[in-house]
Amino acid sequence: MDSLFVPLVILIAVIAGVLLLMRSFSKRSAETKAGVAAANSPKDPVQLAKESAAKLNEEQHRRLYSLIAQGQGMAAIKLYLQATGEGLRASRDAVGALAAHPQPFTPEAKPKDLLSEDDDEPERFPYRYRAIVSKGDVTREVSSNMLNDEIYGRIRTLAKSGDVEGAALALTRHSDITIKQAREFIELLDD
């Protein structure tokens, strides 16, 4: 009996040590996974889109959305990566957020609200801006020198948020189309 007692105590001590080590490793693993998950937790996509758009200058912003519109996601990610110097994963997430939640270009200085009603006359730009939407066989176009990317982006945001009438009024205010034509245009934007 004495000859079995010592090996049995050693065996129990080894099993207890192994169990303690396993518990310690599983606890560390869980903490590490929680830390990685917290670090990689996705930001609010709308906020990410706003922050990402703010890192681009006007030319980069225009080129990035041009690539997104053409379906060239990899080229858009590469452009964002080169423009901001962020990592590949951060660039991929930023371009995804910008594609899902389009952001108008806003210069550093806060401009006056371009869709405010207290202006007497909308600003006229030296170029003619064309906005085209289509669905199936139906295509609508608005061309005006009172529109630009920022104003059109705000009109789209109004339409996407469900304020179709507000978007249509803003579109008629910044172009020479009737309210009926503006509503038809906005209806195609909703999809």
Image (tube, rainbow, N blue to C red):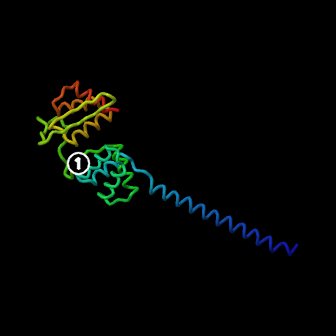
Residue 148 locus on image (x, y percent): 19, 41
Q: Seen from this angle, which residue lies furthest front?
A: 137
Residue 140, image quadrant: top left
For residue 7, above or below residue 55: below
Q: Which quarter of the rendering shows the N terminus?
A: bottom right
Q: Nearer the viewer, residue 177 or 170?
A: 177
Q: Seen from this angle, which residue lies furthest top?
A: 180
Q: Residue at x 49, y 59 (%)?
A: 35
Q: Nearer the viewer, residue 51 or 63?
A: 63
Q: Residue at x 34, y 55 (%)?
A: 78
Residue 128 locus on image (x, y percent): 15, 39
Q: Nearer the viewer, residue 73 or 96?
A: 73
Q: Residue at x 11, y 35 (%)?
A: 121
The residue pinned by badge 1 equals 106
Q: Residue at x 36, y 48 (%)?
A: 73
For residue 16, above or below residue 51: below
Residue 4 locus on image (x, y percent): 84, 72
Q: Is residue 44 left or right of residue 108?
A: right
Residue 64 locus on image (x, y percent): 29, 49
Q: Which quarter of the rendering shows the C terminus?
A: top left
Q: Is residue 30 left or right of residue 59?
A: right
Helix or strand or loop: what does disc 1 sit on?
loop
**Within 10 angstroms of label 1, few (less than 14), some, or many (20 or more) residues?**
some
Amino acid at the residue labelled 1: Thr
Q: Seen from this angle, which residue lies furthest right?
A: 1
Q: Nearer the viewer, residue 68 or 125?
A: 68
Residue 6, image quadrant: bottom right
